[in-house]
């Protein structure tokens, strides 16, 4: 470690502040903005209440010009009110954020400095509970288009490491102008006027879901339409149910009946839904009639909601059979497997997107600030779980035809290389079953 803790003079422009000064250890804990200035981190204007198509478009136009705060608040509102979309995004996020990870040297760099640098950073991050939250936050770039974390570095045991990860809400970012809407700047809420602060390299980790405009990149841009239609359909269905869903009670009285009989009948009709019974004279009669629905209109609005849910499912997870099976039993095992494979590829891409941002923001900074002059920037490998038995069987078949990399197998299955002969465990291959001698073997 002593060779690696010496810090040479930094000459990398990306590691300089806005005044051209080097970011030395004494300034690494500098916060670019308060944690929650004027409630900006936790406040929500709830613009989705009474949302219309015209309002949705106005929020989109503001975001495209570099002012996404209202749009981000709307996205939070819609996800809160529509559990199916929120659940699918949460599943896609947690399947990546909850898996094991390892910090490794880049592929093709097995030299000693690169291994030492990767091992040092891996040891730091494996024991940092906030880092897992950082992964989860960075993966929200899929629905929102981008995710940014303010990195806090400090010198611990003569090693400059990320000690904290300040997760910053998407609503706290904007662009300096409409012509520079592709840039992300932090809104400084400490002052009476909301000034913008440029993100300093080395102090920020940003993950982007690629689009020509980062404020129009997230999948929620497409989801919002279908959630709005689904919620509108549900509202109309509720109105329909209130008007026509309940049976109608009708009271009949004879022309010669007195006022007392008519008043008693009226009270009974009003109270039948609560009391469940009525006592009437033989001069009056009560009939409960079901509503006649031409063409069974009660199925129209559920069908609208079902169509919206299907569109959201295909957008977020890659197929409807991943989350729903129709009552008719439609679909097949093969189709479900195809959809599952599609969902796995989407999650794998989510992981590689975060892995790339990790190497750019944390790996490169860690190497430069600690003087790892001969080491390559470490990378992170997220282990996305799938059917490992099927994968192992595939590798066994391929290994009979072509040589395989032991390092790749260790990495893919998250295995630790034995420290010595005493740490090795080997299993003998299992003989394949022989159906013709199965009974014979059992008698023995």
Image (cartoon, grey):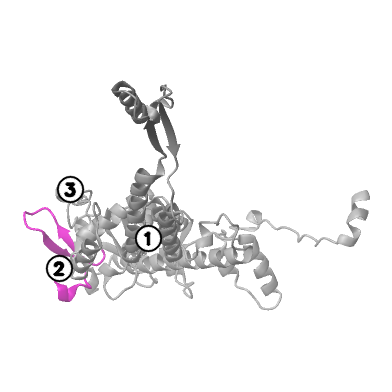
What distance separates the C-alpha of mark 1 from that of mark 3?
A: 24 Å
Q: Judge left or right: residue 69 versus residue 127.
A: left
Pointer 1 residue: 139
Residue 384 is situated, as x and y percent measured from the top left of the image, at 51, 61
Q: Earlier in the sequence, mark 2 or mark 1?
A: 2
Pointer 2 residue: 18
Asked if residue 97 shows in the view, the reply is: no
Residue 270 is situated, as x and y percent measured from the top left of the image, at 34, 30
- The tally of labels here is 3
Judge by depth and name the residue closer to the eye, 29 or 35.
Answer: 35
- For label 2, the SS is loop
What is the crowding at mark 2: few (fewer than 14 residues within 10 Å), some, or many (at least 20)? few
Q: Judge left or right: residue 106 versus residue 331.
A: left
- For label 3, the SS is helix
What is the crowding at mark 1: few (fewer than 14 residues within 10 Å), some, or many (at least 20)? many
Q: Which residues are magenta?
A: 177-202
Quarter in which the N terminus is drawn: bottom left
Judge by depth and name the residue closer to the eye, 129 or 173.
Answer: 173
Q: Earlier in the sequence, mark 1 or mark 3?
A: 3
Residue under the image location 35 percent in, 43 percent down: 242
């Amino acid at each position: 470690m002593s060779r690696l803790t010496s810090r040479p003079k930094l000459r990398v422009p990306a590691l300089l502040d806005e005044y051209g000064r080097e970011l030395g250890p004494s300034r690494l804990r500098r916060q670019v903005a308060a944690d929650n200035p004027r409630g900006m981190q936790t406040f929500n204007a709830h613009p989705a209440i009474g949302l219309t198509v015209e309002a949705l478009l106005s929020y989109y136009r503001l975001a495209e010009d570099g002012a996404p705060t209202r749009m981000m608040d709307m996205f939070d509102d819609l996800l809160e009110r529509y559990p199916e979309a929120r659940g699918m995004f949460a599943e896609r996020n947690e399947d990546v954020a909850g898996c094991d990870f390892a910090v490794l040297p880049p592929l093709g760099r097995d030299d000693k400095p690169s291994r030492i640098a990767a091992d040092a950073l891996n040891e730091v991050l494996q024991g940092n509970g906030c880092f897992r939250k950082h992964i989860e936050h960075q993966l929200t770039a899929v629905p929102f288009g981008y995710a940014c974390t303010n990195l806090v570095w400090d010198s611990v045991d003569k090693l400059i490491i990320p000690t904290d990860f300040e997760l910053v809400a998407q609503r706290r970012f904007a662009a300096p102008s409409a012509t520079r809407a592709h840039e992300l700047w932090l809104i400084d809420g400490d002052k009476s006027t909301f000034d913008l602060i440029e993100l300093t390299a080395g102090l920020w980790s940003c993950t982007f879901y690629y689009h020509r405009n980062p404020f129009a990149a997230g999948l929620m841009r497409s989801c919002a339409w279908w959630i709005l239609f689904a919620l509108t359909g549900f509202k109309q269905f509720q109105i329909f149910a209130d008007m026509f869903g309940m049976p109608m009670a009708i009271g009949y009285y004879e022309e010669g009946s007195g006022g007392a009989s008519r008043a008693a009948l009226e009270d009974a009709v009003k109270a039948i839904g609560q009391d469940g019974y009525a006592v009437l004279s033989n001069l009056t009669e009560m009939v409960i009639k079901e509503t006649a629905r031409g063409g069974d209109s009660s199925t129209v609005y559920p069908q609208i909601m079902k169509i919206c849910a299907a569109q959201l499912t295909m957008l977020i997870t890659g197929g409807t059979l991943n989350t729903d099976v129709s009552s008719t039993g439609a679909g097949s095992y093969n189709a479900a497997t195809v959809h599952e494979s599609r969902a796995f590829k989407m999650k794998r891409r989510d992981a590689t997107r975060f892995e790339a941002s990790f190497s750019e923001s944390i790996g490169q900074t860690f190497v430069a600030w600690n003087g790892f002059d001969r080491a390559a920037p470490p990378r992170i490998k997220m282990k996305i779980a799938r059917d490992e038995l099927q994968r192992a069987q595939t590798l066994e078949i391929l290994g009979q035809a072509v040589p395989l990399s032991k390092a790749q197998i260790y990495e893919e299955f998250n295995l630790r290389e034995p420290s010595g002969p005493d740490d090795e465990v080997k299993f003998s291959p299992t003989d394949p079953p022989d159906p013709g001698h199965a009974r014979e073997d059992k008698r023995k």
